[in-house]
Amino acid sequence: MKLSTTIDAIAISVDGVLDTEFEELAGKYGWPHLHSPSRPQVMRQVTAARPRVVVLHVRQSTDRAMELIRALQNSWQRPAVIVVASSQSNGFEREARLAGVTCFLADNESTSRINAYVESIVKTN
């Protein structure tokens, strides 16, 4: 039986749009990166990898993002969730925060700042 190990973070691009900066962020810090995965794919990855943080990159699919946030918050692992969103919809941010998102960041945040948030969460858990 293979024992799973906990990793710091998983990066998930909710929309099918390839964002090279987000891709580079995941690669730079060694985070697995999923592109436009289904909810079952995300949950399988989270169960297998046991990340402390899930970083969701959201461009337009706020409904899909909310589905993933709720599924993550209802999972037994309950990883911290950071949303990096280009959508400036206050309704989406409010709904995400009410659903239990740990941190909501604008898409123009620097990759080092996003990683600093991940590291601070990992250190406190």
Image (cartoon, rainbow, N blue to C red):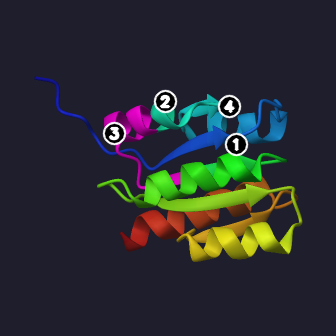
Query: Does the residue at mark 4 contact the one at mark 3 (Cβ under 8 Å)?
Result: no
Residue at coordinates 67% horizontally, 59% vertically from top-left? 83
**Considering the numbered disc 3 on the image, is that residue within a helix, a strand or a loop?**
helix
* Distance in Å between CA atoms under marks 2 and 3: 10 Å
* Distance in Å between CA atoms under marks 1 and 2: 21 Å
- Quarter of the image for the C terminus: give it: bottom left
Relative placement, left or right, of 20 versus 8 is: right
Q: Which of the two labelled residues, at mark 1 and mark 4, occupies the earlier sequence position? A: 1
Residue on which the image places disc 3: 47
User: Amino acid type of disc 3?
Assistant: Thr
Residue on which the image places disc 2: 41
Residue on which the image places disc 4: 36
Q: Which of the two labelled residues, at mark 2 and mark 3, occupies the earlier sequence position? A: 2
Magenta stretch bounds:
43-54
Q: Which of the two labelled residues, at mark 1 and mark 2, occupies the earlier sequence position? A: 1
Residue 48 colored in magenta in the image: yes
Q: Residue furthest top?
A: 1
Residue on which the image places disc 1: 25
* Of marks 1 and 3, the one in the foreground: 3
